[in-house]
Image (spheres, rainbow, N blue to C red):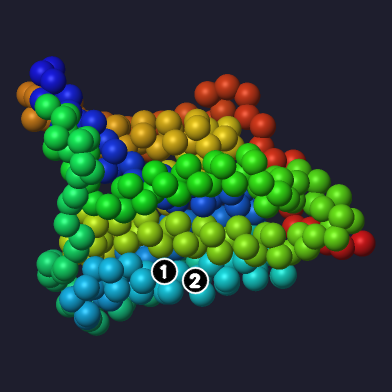
């Protein structure tokens, strides 16, 4: 493998990992607070659709991104209401929201664009930061990305700092480990858990919009293609830590990039095997084959004030 091919592979891996990474960073925070959002897939799909429609209708991808965030907010609030106020089963409600999002976006897509439309919509252009973009060999293939990639990196760093060094981070982690103590301290467990689910909606909306207006500049039915489930698997793979979760997302992105890279190199690998590689890694993570997993104590457990 030449350095040029390696650079292209790294750039593709980073780009393909972004939607998963954006979904997982919000999901990580939510799970640390005790709320499992199986609806990340539905949130991302809603964001992808709303971003595409907003960009198509206004001609502005920036407004499309705003449309995506606004559209996902009610989905996130619905998940928060079902999980925290009604204390419904978090897995069942999340899967139900995913089905609802798939059906609603498919119907709306066919009504607006037509059943077989592949209409190109306005999207974000690629951009490379100074100095990094001028590096030999690796500059353009790796660092010339949509600016949402750099926003995601900033979100990761900011989330890590908040979770580790601020009282907000301490309260979030405490809500997932010992919510009764949080309640006794005077803080609202309900408010914390609502807040983290809304944060998942925010990051998932950006991840979905990245797919439609940041990457391929169109919308297709079910275009998230399991990215939301991979985001949840990445959190498990990363053992609920930010650093390892990021590594897991990059592995998933690299596994997806191999679908295109290996055939280009003339390596004969069954197409079905290449397609299933990210999901195989996810299965390994969920099956607990990557070491001992220490989930937050109160994960999926609704809190009831005594």
The residue depicted at 38 percent of the width and 59 percent of the height is 206
Is residue 24 at least partly visible in the picture? no
Is residue 14 at least partly visible in the picture? yes
The residue depicted at 58 percent of the width and 60 percent of the height is 197
Circle 2 residues within 10 Å: few <14, some 14–19, many ≥20? many
Q: Looking at the rendered structure, which numbered label has been put on residue 73?
A: 2
Residue 105 shown left or right of residue 35 in the figure: left
Q: Which residue is mark 1?
A: 69
Please tell me whether mark 2 sits on a helix, a strand or a loop.
helix
- In percent of width and height, residue 3 lies at 13, 20
Please tell me whether mark 1 sits on a helix, a strand or a loop.
helix
Circle 1 residues within 10 Å: few <14, some 14–19, many ≥20? many
- Which image quarter holds the C terminus? bottom right
Residue 159 shown left or right of residue 169 in the figure: left
- In percent of width and height, residue 115 lies at 18, 74
The residue depicted at 67 percent of the width and 32 percent of the height is 294
- In percent of width and height, residue 218 lies at 19, 64
The residue depicted at 56 percent of the width and 55 percent of the height is 37
User: Image quadrant of residue 5?
Assistant: top left
Farthest residue, direction right? 306
Alpha-carbon span between mark 1 and mark 2: 6 Å
Do callouts 1 and 2 mark residues in contact (Cβ within 8 Å)? Answer: yes
Q: Looking at the rendered structure, which numbered label has been put on residue 174?
A: none
């Amino acid at each position: 493998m030449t350095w040029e091919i390696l650079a292209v592979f790294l750039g593709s891996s980073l780009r393909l990992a972004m939607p998963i990474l954006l979904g997982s960073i919000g999901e990580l925070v939510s799970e640390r607070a005790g709320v499992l959002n199986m609806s990340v897939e539905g949130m991302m799909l809603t964001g992808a659709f709303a971003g595409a429609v907003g960009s198509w209708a206004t001609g502005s991808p920036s407004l499309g991104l705003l449309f995506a965030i606004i559209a996902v907010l009610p989905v996130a609030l619905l998940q928060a209401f079902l999980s925290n106020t009604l204390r419904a089963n978090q897995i069942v409600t999340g899967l139900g929201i995913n089905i609802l999002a798939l059906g609603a976006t498919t119907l709306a897509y066919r009504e607006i664009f037509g059943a077989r439309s592949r209409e190109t919509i306005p999207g974000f252009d690629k951009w490379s930061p100074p100095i990094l973009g001028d590096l030999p060999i690796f500059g353009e293939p790796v660092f010339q990305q949509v600016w949402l990639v750099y926003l995601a990196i900033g979100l990761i760093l900011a989330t890590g700092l908040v979770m580790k060094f601020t009282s907000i981070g301490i309260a979030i982690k405490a809500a997932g480990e010992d919510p009764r103590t949080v309640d006794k301290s005077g803080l609202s467990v309900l408010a914390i858990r609502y807040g983290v689910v809304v944060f998942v909606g925010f990051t998932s909306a950006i991840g979905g919009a990245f797919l439609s207006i940041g990457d391929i500049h169109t919308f297709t039915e079910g275009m998230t293609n399991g990215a939301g489930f991979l985001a949840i698997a990445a959190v498990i793979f990363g053992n609920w830590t930010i650093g390892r979760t990021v590594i897991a997302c990059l592995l998933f992105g690299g596994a997806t990039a191999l679908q295109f890279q290996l055939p280009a190199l003339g390596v004969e690998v069954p197409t079905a095997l290449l397609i299933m590689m990210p999901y195989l890694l996810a299965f390994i993570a969920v099956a607990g084959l990557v070491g001992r997993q220490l989930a937050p104590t109160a994960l999926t457990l609704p809190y009831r004030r005594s």
